[in-house]
Image: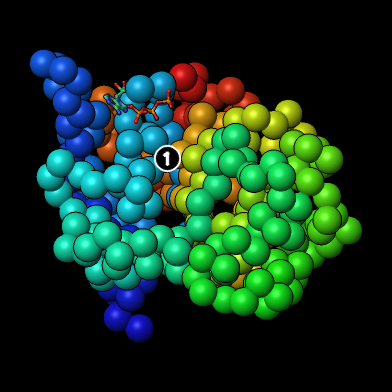
């Protein structure tokens, strides 16, 4: 394998400027980063530093003002809306803090949706959804509505939905933000297990220190710049601090 094959996402000098009336907000000031295939990468930084903005660029959910994002060697800026939608549907799965499940649909119906959007028949999509729900430990909750399961179980349904099209990349924006300590740990462990079992690349934007123990790489964002990038073994994690610094 050539060294470049190890890299699944490359960002080159990614900049984002929001125009708020007469004011310009410089949310990202040039972030260049390689994400390795199969790694667990956490994006960390204080509130307002640009984590979610960067996450949205990497996930193809928003476009940079300048710079580029490539996924599997394909420059997202060169794609039209249809091509971008295909990449988002087939190559990426998304997980959010507030789960974003459809409340009137059962677990299996929620998880089947991305496959139905991808053109599969409802019966086949439901079978694939049931299989992945089983994998995340919810094989016994297929026909429950979101309101009929716990917060941790709702996030498991959302993880199953993110995985059901078998993407290479899963992006999770504060996936433990609405969960208690113990449930948050279970969700982090599940993401780490899925990374290992399915060989997916996991990217999280997070405030959660617990996420670091699962991370292969940590990127600290400060004022829209990558302040530091550290691989496992290059950072030390202790409760409430990292490398002796208190986390924001
Ligand atoms: N749609 C927008 N329009 C204008 N400014 C924005 C917009 N979205 C974000 N910003 C600004 O861009 C900067 C980065 O915001 P971002 O949401 O990426 O930070 P964050 O690190 O994810 O913060 P948090 O941890 O609080 O979610 C902030 O100054 C924010 O106010």
35 w.r.t. 95: above or below: below
Q: Quadrant of residue 220?
A: top left
Q: Position of residue 182 (x, y in %)?
A: 77, 34
Give the labeled residue for mark 1. Answer: 43
Write the residue at 15% across / 41% down. Answer: 65
Q: Position of residue 197 (x, y in %)?
A: 65, 69
Q: Position of residue 8 (x, y in %)?
A: 36, 66
Q: Is residue 220 visible in the rendered structure shown here?
A: no
The answer to which of 112 and 93 lies nearer the viewer is: 112
| Label 1 packing within 10 angstroms: few (<14), some (14-19), many (20+) | many
Furthest-top residue in this view: 22
- Left or right, residue 140 beside residue 146: right
Q: Is residue 139 visible?
A: yes
Q: Quadrant of the N terminus?
A: bottom left
Q: Residue at x 51, y 51 (%)?
A: 94
Where residue 22 sits in the image (x, y, percent)? 11, 16
The colour scheme applied to this rendered structure is rainbow
Residue at 51% in and 65% down: 117
Question: SS class of the residue under badge 1?
Answer: strand
Image point (37%, 34%), residue name: 51
Left or right: where 136 falls relative to 23: right
The correct choice, above or below, for 74 with respect to 136 in the image is below
């Amino acid at each position: 394998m050539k060294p470049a094959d190890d890299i699944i996402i490359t960002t080159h000098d990614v900049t984002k400027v929001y125009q708020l009336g007469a004011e310009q907000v410089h949310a990202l000031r040039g972030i260049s980063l390689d994400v390795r295939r199969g790694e667990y990468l956490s994006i960390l930084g204080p509130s307002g530093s640009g984590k979610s903005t960067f996450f949205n660029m990497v996930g193809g959910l928003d476009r940079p003002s300048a710079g580029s994002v490539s996924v599997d060697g394909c420059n997202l800026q060169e794609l039209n809306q249809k091509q971008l939608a295909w990449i988002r549907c087939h190559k990426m799965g998304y997980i959010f803090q507030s789960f974003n499940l459809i409340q009137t649909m059962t677990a299996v119906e929620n998880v089947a949706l991305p496959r139905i959007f991808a053109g599969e028949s409802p019966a086949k999509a439901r079978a694939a959804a049931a299989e992945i729900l089983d994998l995340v430990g919810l094989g016994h909750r297929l026909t429950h509505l979101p309101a009929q399961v716990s917060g941790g179980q709702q996030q498991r349904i959302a993880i199953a939905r993110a995985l059901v099209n078998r993407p290479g990349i899963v992006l999770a924006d504060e996936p433990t933000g609405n969960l208690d300590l113990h449930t948050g740990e279970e969700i982090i462990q599940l993401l780490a297990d899925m990374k290992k079992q399915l060989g997916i690349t996991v990217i999280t934007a997070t405030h959660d220190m617990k996420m670091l123990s699962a991370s292969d790489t940590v990127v600290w964002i400060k004022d829209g710049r990558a302040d530091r990038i550290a691989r496992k073994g290059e950072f030390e994690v202790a409760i409430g601090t990292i490398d002796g610094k208190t986390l924001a």
